[in-house]
Amino acid sequence: MSSASLENAFAVLRENDRGTYTVPTKGLYPFQWNWDSCLTALGLAAISQDRAWTEIETLFEHQWPDGMVPQIVFHVPSDTYFPGPDIWQTNRPTPTSGITQPAVAGFAVRRLFDRAQDRHTDRAMAETRSRALLHKIDAWHAWFYRNRDPHGEGLVAILHPWEAGRDNSVDWDEALAQVPTSGITPYRRRDTDHANPAHRPTDAQYDAFVWLVEHFRRLGWDNSLLHDASPFRVVDPAFNAILIRSCADLAAVAEALGEKTLAQRNRAWAQRSLDALDALWHVSSQRYQGFNRATGERIDSRSIGGLLPILAAIPPARAAAIAGQIAAMGEQMHFLVPSHDPGAPGYEAQRYWRGPIWLITNFLIENGLRQAGQTEVADRIVRSSLDLIEKSGFAEYYEPQTGAALGGGRFTWTAAMVIEFLT
Ligand code: 2M8
């Protein structure tokens, strides 16, 4: 992998930099996205640590009074994306959407914090800026457990597929089929102006996405009501594992800064959720499986959602089994890690989160594998990721067999992950 790739990655970040935040890619996603920004900050740190902290700080400036950190911040108007602020109607000073996204902020802040330990000036900045963020991230974690686990089961639910970040995963098919779609206001999608419709969610899925938004809007975006009122409430192992890891990482930073109470609270959340997550281990498929909290049904799907818990401190035998599952997919496919098992029902090689490879999930899985001592598969994922870049550039996602570029181009978090892999 040449230094040209690194330079190209920096160029993608610069192109999508809007000063205090980055957009995922122009046209298709012209605003700030929550988990894109937190992961992008890791790449930005190789250019400027100051700018990396700003990326996360900007996101948290738009945290809701109840602690939620929104999925999208609509900093400036744009008519190239649907649904925009007029649909969400969340009544925030700067418009935002009304749902959240995977809680990677704690993980990202710890990574920035640990990286900054080498140089005195970076360290001083990291301490000041993470101290301020700690309390905001802690409030977000508290929000999750209060509003998304209101009956104290130890695991949080997502109320919309967009919250998972894996919008049209096979994992949601059955739960989404229980969402009514009649009576929605007619709308026009914009994503299919920028990307091939065959690589995006279906219209039927969009109808259900929109129904949920309109349902929550009718409830005034009152987070104390939404969980029990939503026909879509799914406990996803990946979403929970990310939160668990972020609670543990936030606790580590808090300990380093002498914030004992905050550290203890986050450690306790991480431990309680880790115990609850263990019950989602599914022996015959050798992965975690989520469940539909509205019906109690287990979600029998072989997606990346069942592998991403490697990011949390899961038992070594489970980590080894997950490494084995990924290696087995590597026998079938040229590139790793497909977002859905290519041999399983529902797999679609080119359709968004139903099969294609994403570099951010590669990065999160690789990080977890390394933490668990599974270096061989971790190294393979890095090689695969860099091969994809060499072959097809900085795409939004990739076809697992051919490595063809799919979705949007010049994609920010893809570039950020390349920087992570190369530096
Ligand atoms: C995709 O999701 C957005 C909605 O949030 C969309 O399709 O309109 C997902 O890949 C999500 O994970 C990502 O954060 C977002 C921006 O890159 O795009």
Image: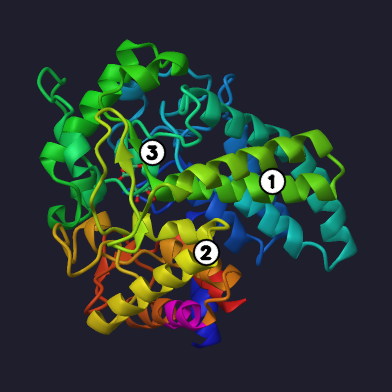
Q: Nearer the viewer, residue 333 or 17?
A: 333
Image position of 154 (left or right of 165): right
In the figure, residue 391 lies in which quadrant?
Answer: bottom left
- Dot 3 falls on a residue whose secondary structure is helix
The three-letter amino acid code for the residue at tag 3 is Glu
> Where's residue 131, x and y in %?
79, 41
The three-letter amino acid code for the residue at tag 2 is Ala
* Residue under pointer 1: 250
Query: CB at mark 1 closer than 8 A to ligand 1?
Result: no
* Residue under pointer 3: 163
Image position of 3 (left or right of 186): right
* Residue under pointer 2: 416
The three-letter amino acid code for the residue at tag 1 is Leu
Dot 1 crowding, Cα within 10 Å, few <14, some 14–19, many 20+: many
> Where's residue 257, x and y in %?
85, 46
Q: Residue at x 15, y 57 (%)?
A: 346
Which mark is first along the chain, 3 or 1? 3
Residue interval drawn in magenta: 376-383
